Image (cartoon, rainbow, N blue to C red):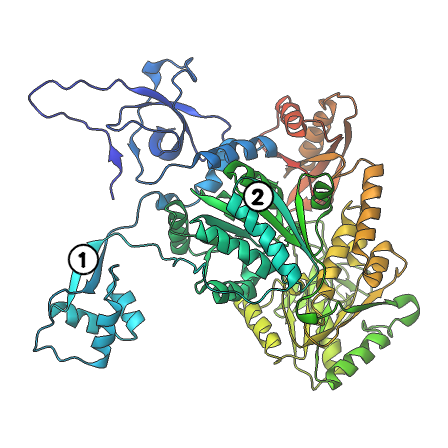
Amino acid sequence: MPLHHSSSSRPSGKIATEPLPRRVQVLLPLPLDRTYDYLDALDTPLGEGDFVRVPFAGRERTGCVWSCDPVCNEVVDEKKLKHVIARHNAPPLPAPMARFINWAAAYTCAPIGSVLRMAMSVPQALDPPAEMTGYVRSTKTAPKSLRMTAARTRVLDVAGGDIPLEAAELARRAGTGISVVRRLAKAGALTRMTCVPSSPFAVPDANRAGPSLSADQEEAAASLRRKVNTGGFSVTLLDGVTGSGKTEVYFEAVAAALKGDKQILVLVPEIPLAGQWLERFTERFSVAPAIWHSNLAQGKRRAAWRAVVDHGAHVVVGARSTLFLPFPDLGLIIVDEEHEAAYKQEEGVIYHARDMAVVRGREAACPVVLASATPSLETTVNVEEGRYNRVHLPDRHGGAVMPHVTAIDMRSEGPETGQWLSPTLRRAMAATFAAGEQAMLFLNRRGYAPLTLCRTCGHRFSCPNCTAWLVTHRAPEGLVCHHCGYHLPPPESCPECSTEDTLAACGPGVERLAEEAGNLFPNRRLAVMASDTPGGAQAAAEILIRVRNCEIDLLIGTQIIAKGHHFPGLTLVGVVDADLGLAGGDLRAGERTFQLLHQVAGRAGRESRPGKVYLQTYMPEHPVMGALVSGDRDAFFEAEAEQRRAFALPPFGRLAAVIVSGRDTGTVEATARRLRRAAPQVKEVEILGPAPAPLTVLHGRARWRLLLKAPRRVNVPGLMKTWLGAVKIPGEVRARIDIDPYSFL
């Protein structure tokens, strides 16, 4: 449909009074931190939130009316202002969404136009889809000459509803060809109609009965339903052990929101791996939800975005960017696995989706549910301080029990040189297979080996673009940088000393682990699963289905096998390098390692057969290993909290990072040091650095870091924006602000 333009001419006769142009402020989805004034002379006055076309920098651009306040920006001479060209035929940006964009831009120190761009990520969806030709059953009696066949009867039955269907869709639902539809239309048995396509997303059935809930589950579900039915902003932690049925509990809240004709947003850490979740949703509500993520095909993105703004998509599940869809009637937000590091956006506008979801719920005045078996320390502290509510599921569903966890001290029980599975773990695997059960080996390291070196001269293969070793892969073969994607074909000799047959792969990845397991158990069916598994998300989904169907005896994988999967026949989990995540100076290293290994362990024994977990570790005395073995999660987090509190580290203090990067190392260092000299002199605020980042070069760019540490009461975003605003950054250098950093590389 065309854009709505202002009239360029008036009808003859009486002289029409020209409306006086009104000044409006328009925000553009560009990396700019201000609005621009335009004159509105359209036939229908613009309102705040309207999407418009305006001239800007010599071309037409789409923006959003941010304010209609005539006193704003009056310093600009009206004679210099340009007119709004047209209004898009789309519902305006909801006021809660505009407030959320303002807040997100201020908190992340990002240009407000960059945040708006995330909400306007599909510009072509701002105009409704083109009209279509649809068919409904004719009210007239079919001609006597029309010979009715089974296929024609099915088409007429399907076309008997009130909503016209396109020929292809009508044929698909009737299980026949398009030619049958066209012959019926030609004969007059179908009526051809021109109409706007309806939403491609069916309404979930909120009244469909779900599975029977235990007493604990019903109590938790009732609490969430009350929050939804009462309305208003609240945050509730749904804290339940692995296998306790958290998903079915919050589905009850989804059903309550649907009954109130509200929209629901569900965030998951990684949508390509949410196949089992989608199956459970479809089984519970009869239809699939709308899906949103960055890799969605453009046509599907357009349909989903438009369905959201038109309230044609009732439930949307997606990754972190789903937060920026402009829902007009949001009634519930759910953040599944709220502790996951995948919710942190590290590029562009840097934000944490869990924290932004809470703000999104506040602006929309709707409940927020954070679900996890291992809640983040930030969420736990918010519960303890009374800002969040908590409902608890202490037991596994259906009588299943938590697995028994054993630490294997690799200092005394390690395998022979060149092997990675301890004798204890090997015996446990053999016993598991003999009992007809499944096993899983977890190693959070992709590829075959993390390093390849020359035994003659010691040369180590590193990435030319990053400060990182190249990882050896066998499928497909080659050496790969996991940061920038650089690929080197398998070398035949050392590039340093030219010696052949002296290259050695050092350390294990999941591919090497599979090689060892295959030699130990040659008659067992095994599969390897990682984020770079050949075949992508589709291949990974097929592997998961085969595991659930007991068509695989041994699954070997990285952290993607740890997240929410239910494998009925899996009773043994072996963690091959339990200490891996504890290296480095990350303040959350212990917390993250505990969360990841607890989630991995939770895959074992989820039904009637008990599960066993073996942790291969060189530090069995470490608090993380002790907490996993004892199962005392709360004691571990209390100790972790005390340690953070003692040093005023998050969540008991605030951190913000400045990452300075550029092609020229000298310019980057000089800029970082200039920033340090201009650092704010505020009591109790510390500035650490500058120093080269641990990943000193990334994607060919040199990197330096500074870190600001402050008490919780300090307005860190405001302080950071003032600080960087006082320093002129060279054009070839980029200085990014990361409020509440999660990565220190």
What residue do we see at 74% from left, 39% from top? 651
Quadrant location of the N terminus?
A: top left
Comparing 528 with 305, the one in front is 305
Q: Which quadrant of the figure has residue 168?
A: bottom left
- Looking at the image, residue 146 lies above or below residue 452: below
**Which residue is labeled 1 in the image?**
193
- Residue 74 screen position, x and y as percent: 41, 14
Left or right: where 121 falls relative to 444: left
- Inspect the image, locate mark 2, and give the three-letter code of the amino acid beneath it: Ala
Comparing 637 with 250, the one in front is 250
Q: Considering only order in the chain, which callout, 2 or 1, is on the residue closer to the N terminus?
A: 1
Left or right: where 531 falls relative to 61: right
Q: Which mark is residue 84?
A: none
Q: Which mark is residue 357?
A: 2
Decide if residue 444 is in sight here.
yes
Decide if residue 606 is in sight here.
no
